C-alpha cells in the first residue's frame, strides 16, 4: 500500500470544520493507504511558545488523538505518533535546512499569511516559524509518504516538500518520493460569526467535544444576518433552509447533536482507557522510529556521512 502522512498541530479540540475538511476523508483513506497521523506538538511552539507549556501541550496531544479515534479512525490501521517523540525528525530537518535558502523560506505564502495572523514580522519571528515548512517536509519524507491530504492553504508547504525531495535526489541520488497532495473537496467551513473561517482561536466553532447544551447555545447565538453561514451548515447536516431562524436554528441544533452523539459516546469510552491511548502512541513511536532509522541511514550513506 502507498503511504499517507497527515495530522495536525496540537492546539486544542478539533471542530466540525476539521471533520468535514479532513477527518472525514481520513476515515475513508485508512482502508486505501498505509496511514500515518502526526500529532505535531513541536510545531505548536512557533507561535505559542509562551502559552503552550507543560500540561497544556500534553493535554492537547491527547485531545487530538481522542478526536481522531472518536470519528472512526482505527488504531489497528492507522499509525499515530507524537512529533517530539521522534528525534529522527529533528535530525532530518537539520539536513533539509541546508537545501533551502532564506529567500525561498520567506517566499512561502502560507508562512506570510500565518505571520500576518500572528501579528509578527520577519524581524521578530523565531527561526522555527520561518522553517516550519522545512520541519513539515521532514514529517512527510521521513516515512516516505506518497500522498498528503491538505487544505488549500497548506499546498505551498507541500510544494516546498516536493522541492526539497527533488533537490536531495538530484544531489545525492534517488532517496525520497515526490509526494502528491490531495485537497479536500469540502471548502473551508465559515465560522458561527459569519465573518471568518471556523477557527479555534476566534471561538466561532462547534467542537466535536461540545455537549448538547453547548451546541444549542452556540447555534442560538450564531450570526444570522446578511452573509451568515447557517445554511451552509444546514446543507452538511441535512436541514432545509428556512429564513425563519426561530424554526431553522433549533432544527439545525438537533441535527448537529444527532451527528455528534456517537462521537461523544465513543470519546467517553476512550477517556476511561488512558493506558490504551498511551499504548497506541507507544506503538506509533516505535514504528516510526524504526522507519526513520532506515531513512536516515540511507540519507547519511548517500551524503557520505558514514564513518
Image: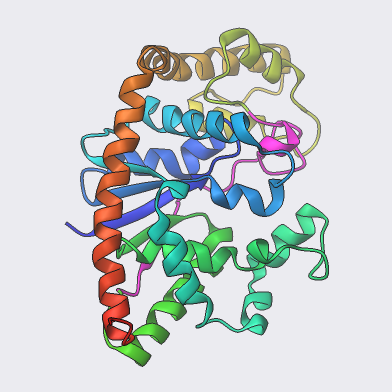
Is residue 62 on the magenta stretch? no
Quadrant for the C terminus in the image: bottom left
Q: Residue at x 38, y 84 (%)?
A: 168
Q: What residue span does the magenta drawing correspond to?
A: 177-205
Residue 15 showing in the rendered view: no
Q: Position of residue 128 (x, y in %)?
A: 64, 62
The way the protein has been coloured in the rendering is rainbow
Image: 39 above or below 232: below
- Specify the principal SS of the magenta part: loop
Q: Position of residue 185 (x, y in %)?
A: 45, 51
Q: Residue at x 74, y 24 (%)?
A: 222
Question: What residue occupies the far bottom of the structure in this picture?
Answer: 171
Question: What residue occupies the far left of the structure in this picture?
Answer: 1
Along the viewing direction, whichever of 261 and 107 lies nearer the viewer? 107
Residue 245 showing in the rendered view: yes
Q: Position of residue 152 (x, y in %)?
A: 54, 59
Image: 213 above or below 93: above
In the picture, measured across the screen, residue 100 lies left or right of residue 67, that is right
Quadrant for the N terminus in the image: bottom left
Q: Position of residue 249 (x, y in %)?
A: 66, 17
Q: Residue at x 77, y 53 (%)?
A: 118
Q: Residue at x 43, y 32 (%)?
A: 65
In the picture, measured across the screen, residue 289 lies left or right of residue 97, that is left
Along the viewing direction, whichever of 236 and 270 lies nearer the viewer? 270
Image: 231 above or below 157: above
Question: What residue occupies the far front of the structure in this picture?
Answer: 307
Amino acid at each position: 500500500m502507498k503511504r499517507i502522512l497527515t495530522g495536525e498541530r496540537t492546539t486544542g479540540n478539533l471542530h466540525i470544520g476539521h471533520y468535514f475538511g479532513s477527518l472525514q476523508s481520513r476515515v475513508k483513506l485508512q482502508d486505501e493507504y498505509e496511514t500515518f497521523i502526526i500529532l505535531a506538538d513541536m510545531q505548536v511552539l512557533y507561535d505559542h511558545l509562551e502559552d503552550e507549556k507543560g500540561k497544556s501541550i500534553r493535554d492537547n496531544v491527547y485531545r487530538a488523538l481522542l478526536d481522531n479515534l472518536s470519528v472512526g479512525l482505527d488504531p489497528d490501521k492507522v499509525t499515530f505518533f507524537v512529533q517530539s517523540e521522534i528525534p529522527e525528525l529533528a535530525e532530518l530537518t537539520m539536513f533539509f535546512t541546508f537545501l533551502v535558502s532564506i529567500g525561498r523560506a520567506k517566499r512561502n505564502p502560507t508562512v506570510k499569511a500565518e505571520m500576518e495572523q500572528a501579528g509578527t514580522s520577519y524581524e521578530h519571528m523565531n527561526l522555527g516559524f520561518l522553517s516550519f515548512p522545512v520541519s513539515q517536509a521532514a514529517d512527510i519524507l521521513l516515512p516516505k509518504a506518497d500522498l498528503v491530504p491538505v487544505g488549500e492553504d497548506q499546498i505551498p508547504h507541500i510544494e516546498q516538500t516536493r522541492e526539497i525531495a527533488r533537490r536531495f535526489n538530484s544531489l545525492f541520488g534517488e532517496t525520497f518520493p515526490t509526494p502528491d497532495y490531495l485537497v479536500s473537496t469540502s471548502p473551508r467551513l465559515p465560522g458561527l460569526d459569519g465573518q471568518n473561517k471556523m477557527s479555534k482561536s476566534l471561538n466561532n466553532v462547534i467542537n466535536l467535544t461540545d455537549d448538547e447544551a453547548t451546541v444549542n447555545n452556540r447555534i442560538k447565538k450564531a450570526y444570522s444576518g446578511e452573509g451568515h453561514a447557517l445554511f451552509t451548515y444546514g446543507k452538511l447536516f441535512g436541514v432545509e433552509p428556512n429564513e425563519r431562524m426561530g424554526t431553522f436554528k433549533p432544527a439545525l441544533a438537533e441535527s448537529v447533536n444527532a451527528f455528534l452523539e456517537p462521537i461523544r459516546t465513543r470519546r467517553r469510552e476512550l477517556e476511561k482507557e488512558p493506558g490504551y491511548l498511551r499504548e497506541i502512541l507507544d506503538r506509533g513511536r516505535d514504528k516510526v522510529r524504526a522507519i526513520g532509522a532506515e531513512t536516515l541511514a540511507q540519507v547519511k550513506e548517500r551524503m557520505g556521512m558514514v564513518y
